[in-house]
Image (cartoon, rainbow, N blue to C red):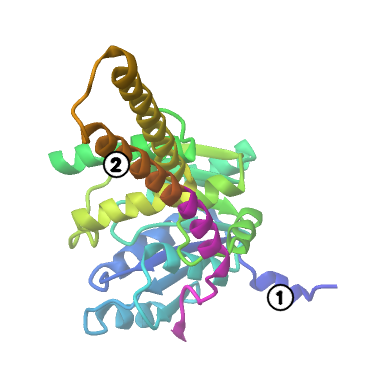
Amino acid sequence: MVDEQIINKMPNFSVVIPCYCSGQWISQLVGEILDEFEKIKQSFEILLINDCSPDDNLTNDAIKKLCQISQVRGIELMTNVGQHKAICCGLDNAKGNTILIMDDDFQNNPKDISNMINNLEVSGNDVIIGTCKRKQAFYRSMGSIFVRKILRRGLNIPAGMSPTSFVLMNSKLKDTILSIKGANPILSPLIFKSTNLIGWETVSSENRKYGNSGYSYSKLVNATMDNYVAATKRPLRVYASFGVLVVFCSISFISYSIYLATIGGNPPPGYTSIVASIFFFGGFNILGIGIMGEYIGRLLSESITDPIYVIREEY
């Protein structure tokens, strides 16, 4: 029988926030979250994961100070591992029955927390994902549209939904996600691989109050490709299919050249054989690379066992 004191120490909700160079405003965000949960009247904890912020310990000191609040816990990572691995660290250490994941830059509004919770309780889904349309610069807006179209096919995201990092999930889904081992965990593909009971909640579209995005344009492109590759092997299969198409075209060209040489006329000497050989062997090379890529991708996903994060200190 589980000790009643242990049960009482387990909060209903865990709020996981990966932090990166947010020391100047993280206390304000935590204050707004505390106010929101005071209205909800539910037990909770807030986990602040400092992803080795390069700001002369400003973020780390702010987290330490916040940990004087009984509901706040802090974790400092030894190296910068990125947003998704920091989230996995938070999931690993979360004690709550329900886990809420938020950004540290105020683009997720704490006032939407109650709506997310009500949606999860009423719908019976395993997870609720916040969706919104944000005002962005033109090039980022065009990039976002392109990204959504790519990810929609890879993750089977419903039309009209634009997923954010504002996510509320139950502990069963959390345990399922953490059981999927991999060197580069990406939250969205892990969610869509783990459950079909996915709900959506329209949340506020907030502008960043402080600082600048840690994602440059090149990082956004890399993150998009990571999401897509983690969700599907379709790029490799398309590559292999293209190789099959090239081989088919080369065989057709060879057949046509033989026809011209024997019946229809006399093609330039040497030209046909050179072009045909380039097409034929080039197609086979592309096909071979695609097939090898399938096996290499699977081998890598099974063989990498390095830890995705290392904790320096907990507060």
Residue 69, how many percent across, how many down?
Answer: 44, 76
Label 1 SS: helix
Disc number for residue 278: 2
Q: Residue furthest left?
A: 138
Closer-to-camera residue (66/269): 269
Residue 271 to residue 94: above or below: above
Other-residue count near label 1 (Cα within 10 Å), few / some / many at <14 / 14–19 / ≥20: few
Q: Would you say 174 lies left or right of 74 here?
A: right
Where does the N terminus fall, quadrant-wise? bottom right
* Residue at 41% across, 50% down: 227
Residue 21, how many percent across, how many down?
Answer: 25, 71
Task: Please state which amino acid type lies under the numbered disc 2.
Answer: Ile
Q: Quadrant of residue 82?
A: bottom left
Residue 199 to residue 168: above or below: above
Residue 123, how many percent across, how many down?
Answer: 61, 36
Q: Please say whether residue 301 is one of the residues in the magenta stretch.
A: yes
Q: Please say whether residue 277 is one of the residues in the magenta stretch.
A: no
Label 2 SS: helix
Q: Residue furthest bottom?
A: 313
Q: CA distance from mark 1 to mark 2?
A: 70 Å
Disc number for residue 6: 1
Instruction: Note whether residue 132 is visible.
Output: no
Residue 2, how many percent across, how many down?
Answer: 80, 73
Residue 37 to residue 26: above or below: above
Q: Which residues are magenta?
A: 291-315
* Residue at 46% across, 35% down: 157
Tag 2 or tag 1, which sits nearer the N-term?
A: 1
Task: Please state which amino acid type lies under the numbered disc 1.
Answer: Ile
